[in-house]
Image (spheres, rainbow, N blue to C red):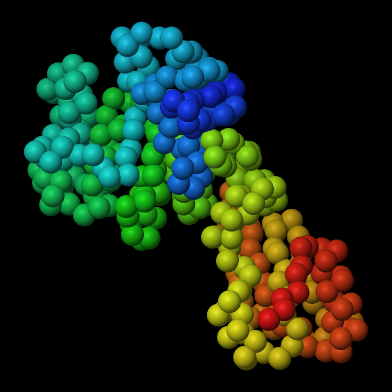
């Protein structure tokens, strides 16, 4: 795949404050690339460098082969026409209808009335709100507003779509609907999507690759399954825990202890590990009973991940033997209340 966005040793400062330091990343055409980080990590600054709303302090940013460094405003406007933007708070014009909001960038770009009307109709059908064409933003739900925002961002056929915390203001069910729509934008229209987020659900649902941003630096990047399957930094591990929640702690562990008297262990599940076969064989040979008391498995980047907390009941030496065999197959930790 050819790169459509490249950051080469990019640094961005605001006075004495360094927002980004030594950022190197490449976004390939046709993929969904997620940039995830907690508040203050530098995500908003990074996205403003992609659409050249902020200049770099040093380094280079290339969009579709064009180096943005030092470009004049006229040339930057041309580059921005190939970039759509979806915002957290929708940023719709309250005085215009849904139709008018989607048509607005087409008017600015000089499309004639017939072509504008045809394009708006196509987009409203694609995002599923044709029946809301003559409603105003205040008459719409949050999910409907974001569908309008996506349609507006796609109006001029951009190659790149920047989704900046596009689901943060939505409830979980609506978030899922919007993420599925963004995935359709990517797969059916071939639009490259850069999703800026602090939510692992966004990465889990739609991303092909991910970069983890922490204090202005990219600490890990690569395919989603690779980065979150074997996290190397504490920041990445914290994000994984928010999705998997595979180890009980605090009140959960106390409740489990009240119901189960055996020894508790957690076992991490990875796509290429056959923990079920190892567990079944080990408990049979060592006369140990087991029960799953916590956890589950989810999909990340097309691979299965998760964790199970097991109660192991038997003689201490036999339980020790089972734990030892499990450790050869996966990451295992004994839980002490």
Which percent across, then down, holds residue 17? 48, 31
Dividing the image into 4 quarters, which one contains the N terminus? top right
User: Is 135 located above or below residue 79 in the figure?
Assistant: below
> At 59% across and 22% down in the image, what residue appears?
9
**Drawn side of residue 320 relative to residue 40, left or right:** right
Whether residue 177 is visible here, answered yes or no, is no
**Drawn side of residue 19 relative to residue 209, left or right:** left
**Drawn side of residue 259 relative to residue 193, left or right:** right
Whether residue 94 is visible here, answered yes or no, is yes
> At 83% across and 89% down in the image, what residue appears?
314
Which percent across, then down, holds residue 301? 58, 49
User: Is 235 located above or below residue 248 in the figure?
Assistant: above
> At 45% across and 14% down in the image, what residue appears?
68
User: Is 250 located above or below residue 307 in the figure?
Assistant: below
Dividing the image into 4 quarters, which one contains the C terminus? bottom right
**Drawn side of residue 252 relative to residue 92, left or right:** right
Which percent across, then down, holds residue 161? 39, 32
In this rendered view, identify the residue nearer to me: 289 or 133.
289
């Amino acid at each position: 795949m050819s790169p459509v966005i490249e950051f080469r040793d990019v640094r961005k400062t605001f006075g004495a404050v360094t927002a980004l330091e030594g950022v190197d990343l490449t976004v390939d055409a046709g993929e969904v690339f997620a940039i995830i980080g907690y508040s203050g990590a530098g995500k908003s600054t990074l996205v403003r460098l992609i659409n050249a709303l902020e200049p770099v302090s040093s380094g280079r940013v290339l969009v579709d082969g064009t180096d943005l460094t030092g470009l004049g405003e006229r040339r930057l406007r041309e580059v921005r026409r190939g970039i759509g933007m979806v915002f957290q708070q929708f940023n719709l014009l309250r005085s215009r209808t849904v139709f008018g909001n989607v048509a607005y960038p087409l008017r600015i770009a000089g499309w004639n009335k017939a072509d504008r009307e045809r394009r708006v109709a196509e987009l409203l059908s694609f995002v599923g709100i044709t029946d809301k064409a003559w409603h105003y933003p205040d008459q719409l739900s949050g999910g409907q507003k974001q569908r309008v925002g996506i349609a507006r961002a796609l109006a001029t056929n951009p190659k790149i779509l920047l989704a900046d915390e596009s689901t943060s203001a939505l409830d979980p069910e609506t978030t899922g609907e919007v993420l599925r729509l963004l995935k359709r934008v990517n797969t059916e229209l071939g639009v490259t999507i850069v999703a800026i987020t602090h939510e692992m659900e966004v990465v889990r649902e739609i991303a092909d690759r991910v970069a983890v941003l922490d204090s202005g630096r990219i600490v890990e990047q690569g395919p989603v399954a690779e980065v979150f399957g074997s996290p190397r930094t504490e920041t990445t591990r914290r994000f994984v825990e928010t999705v998997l929640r595979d180890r009980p702690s605090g009140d959960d562990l106390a409740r489990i202890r009240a119901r189960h008297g055996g020894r508790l262990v957690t076992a991490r599940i990875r796509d290429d590990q056959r923990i079920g076969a190892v567990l079944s064989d080990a408990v049979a040979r060592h006369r140990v009973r087991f029960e799953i008391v916590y956890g589950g498995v989810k999909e990340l980047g097309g691979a299965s991940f998760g964790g199970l907390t097991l109660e192991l009941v038997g003689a201490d030496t036999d339980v020790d033997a089972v734990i030892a065999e499990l450790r050869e197959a996966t990451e295992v930790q004994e839980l002490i209340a």
